[in-house]
Amino acid sequence: MAGPGIAVRGPRSLLRQIREAMAGGGPAQAKLDMVVRTIAVSMVAEVCSIYLRRASGDLELFATEGLSRDAVHVTRMKPGEGLVGETMRLGRPLNLSDAASHPSFSYRPETGEDPYHAFLAVPLLRGGRAIGVLVVQNRTERVYEDEEVEDLQIIAMVLAEMVSSSELLGADELKDVELAPHKPERLKGARFAEGLAYGVAVLHEQPVAPEQLLSDDALAEEARLKWAIEALQTQIDEMLDGQHGLVGASYEVLDTYRLFAHDRGWNRGLQEAVRSGLTAEAAVERVRSEHRARLGQARDPYLRERLHDLEDLNDRLLRHLSGDVHAVRQLPEDAILIARNLGPADLLEYDRTKLKGILLEEGSAASHAGIVARALDIPCVGRLAGLRDRVSEGDPVVVDAETAEAWLRPRPDVVKALKARMEVRAQRKAEFARLRDTPAFTRDGSKITLLMNAGLAVDLDILGETGAEGIGLFRTEFQFMVAEEMPRLEAQTALYEKVLEAANGMPVTFRTLDLGGDKLLPYMELEREDNPALGWRAVRMGLDRPALLRLQIRALIKAAAGRELRIMFPLVANVDEFRAARAFVDQEVAWALKRGRPAPARLDVGAMVEAPSLLWHLDALLPMTDFVSVGTNDLMQYLFAADRGNPRVSDRYDPLSPAALRALKTIQQACEDTGTPVSVCGEMAGRPLEAFALVALGFDRLSMPPAGIGPVKQMVLSCDREAARRNVEALLKGSGGSLRGEIETLARKLYVAV
């Protein structure tokens, strides 16, 4: 038999009574008193109280029915203090038959709660954050039934929305109530892309707030919810089938989405909330808040990851309900993008003229989101724990990618200091701009060729502004990653023609498709791999699917239209792979000539040295190639067996270590001995200190993100290469794990601008 409470009557009538009480005029306190009185009567409870969180963090008794009225606005508790504070800390209901026997019980004589034993408290959750606590109490010792707990949670959710929207309290009463994070906070993370930015927070997956909480027709709402869930399930199933979906989303994430989307518990929770009188949107928000409160405090990273999966799932369901599945986000000026993580193509969906900075909870500097951020010259800081729960849409935010910090709602003095530093950076950029047309010669006369990495249309627009002497790495896969379907021959040819025309006679090195690993295509079915970085990717995929690789080579030859052409194959692990790939180039040249089409005026075919296996077979590889390029990003992760996309291990090695520098010297020396042109096109080349080490090792062609060219050129102009060579070669004999400190000291000693 059901116990006394609203489980008998259902929460819908109570919610309407609360709405009616709020509709009338009168003081805010009178409205609150009416709310607690209405809940107490309906719950057959002798006490009902509302506590709200002040900006200080304390919980204050705002209204009560049953306790002493003299305690209102007098009784306060800190988070974790007393049963109310414990409910706030836990973020979930506390249901006790005898409150006084609980170890967290805190006796407050001014409340007069001595005679009450049964105690049920639920947090007022909004966006997963507890802004207060709703309590009912009875004299008899009993545990409230599940239906009563469920119904009180629904009431608490509605009250939280009413408080936040100023329906219960006016602006004056709310000015010291903490409805959202408001205090200045500083988070320490990891630098993904250099720079400084100040702007307003924009959430990458912005929740769709429910405009109406209570439904007029429960059956109609249940039908809407059922339709939206089925549409969501279909969408996710299609993602996994490789038909549609997010670019760069991993199979594991999508598989988890599918498990949650079909989970009976999740579906049942939503259905029960709708049947209780909530709209479908309000039901989603209620379930979301419960999950965030329950899992948000979990220390287990797996559980926190599941919370993020549920967050994304709830956001998607809300968009289905609102019909806003494919809406384009409009950015404010000076937008700072806030996200858990970003796929390689996600950044391309935003207006880059308004996007000033990026803050991420996860990721790594070597991830492709980081690479794209550097290519776009957008400051980015990642691995900021708890970021999304600590920032609200529209909050002022500072991105400090020099110190790898984020300032949320910064103090005026922090903003002032940041703007002064931004002015200094602007002056440095002006200095770099003045060096644009200055040839990059070292002080002792060595010419260093500085090239630009590219892959986006925006890169072509700024090629002339950077002072680069060509494009040392054009990532052709980005065109495939942002397309809804496989680009055809005409589309590929058009892009490559545009690149060659923008280069205006300067050399361009096209890297063939480097797909797989963390770069997946939504329209291409790939088998799940336990270790995709070591799996079916790059040139391996091209050799196994020759039609894909040959079509791209055909487009490159057609785009060259008799001009010079440079083609480079990624992740070549042995000479047979390069031999087979080069044979495709020869076949496509013959195919073009047979049809009367011009062959390139000069055709250079090279390989990327990324697999450590090549270090011991360079004598066989180099005579086959016209040039090679060292991809330090992958070379380092394979040398040190450390996944560059895994933040737990990506920072465990330093490219300025004896092992890494000796490997690079081996490549440089082999190329020098055979007369093979060699360049470095990894992230190392774009950082002045690392570039200083590369120049000292003998490399004279460096390809880097556009933002790196100015600082690296300034370094080159201040460098005595011979002195650097002698000192760095001596350091290579060291036994330490890293030479970064020693190389920094050397640069200062030689007055090199790093």
Image: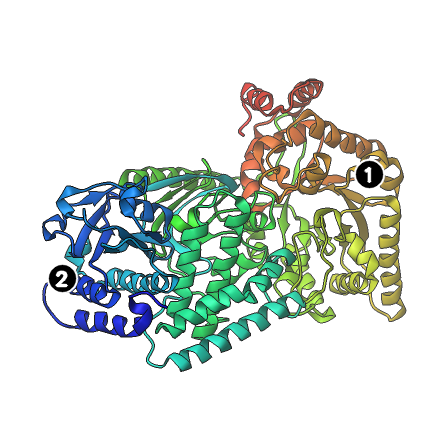
Q: Which mark is residue 595?
A: none
How crowded pointer 2 is (Cα within 10 Å; few <14, some 14-19, many 20+) is rated as: some
Q: Position of residue 143 (x, y in %)?
A: 34, 55
What residue type is disc 1 on? Leu
State the residue at coordinates (67%, 68%). 241
Q: In terms of image quadrants, where is residue 86?
A: top left
Q: Position of residue 258 (x, y in %)?
A: 59, 64
Camera-near label (2 vs 1) is: 2
Q: Left or right: 256 with respect to 603?
A: left
State the residue at coordinates (62%, 31%). 654
Query: Is residue 356 among the parts visible in the rendering?
Result: no
State the residue at coordinates (43%, 54%). 292
Question: Which secondary structure lies at badge 1?
Answer: helix
Q: In terms of image quadrants, where is residue 366?
A: top right
Q: Nearer the viewer, residue 439 or 610?
A: 610
Quadrant the C terminus occupies: top right
Question: Which secondary structure lies at badge 2?
Answer: helix
How many numbered marks are there?
2
Q: Left or right: 294 with respect to 470?
A: left
Mark 2 to mark 1 CA distance (whole Å): 75 Å
* Colour style of the rendered protein structure: rainbow
Q: Left or right: 100 with respect to 352?
A: left
Query: Is residue 149 among the parts visible in the rendering?
Result: yes
Q: Nearer the viewer, residue 703 or 716?
A: 703
Task: Kindly indicate whether the residue at mark 1 contacts the one at mark 2 (C-beta within 8 angstroms).
Answer: no
Above/below status of 426 relative to 693: below
Q: Left or right: 461 with respect to 205?
A: right
What residue type is disc 2 on? Ala
Q: Position of residue 238 (x, y in %)?
A: 63, 70
Q: Which residue is mark 1?
A: 614
Q: Which residue is mark 2?
A: 28
Mark closer to the chain start, 2 or 1: 2
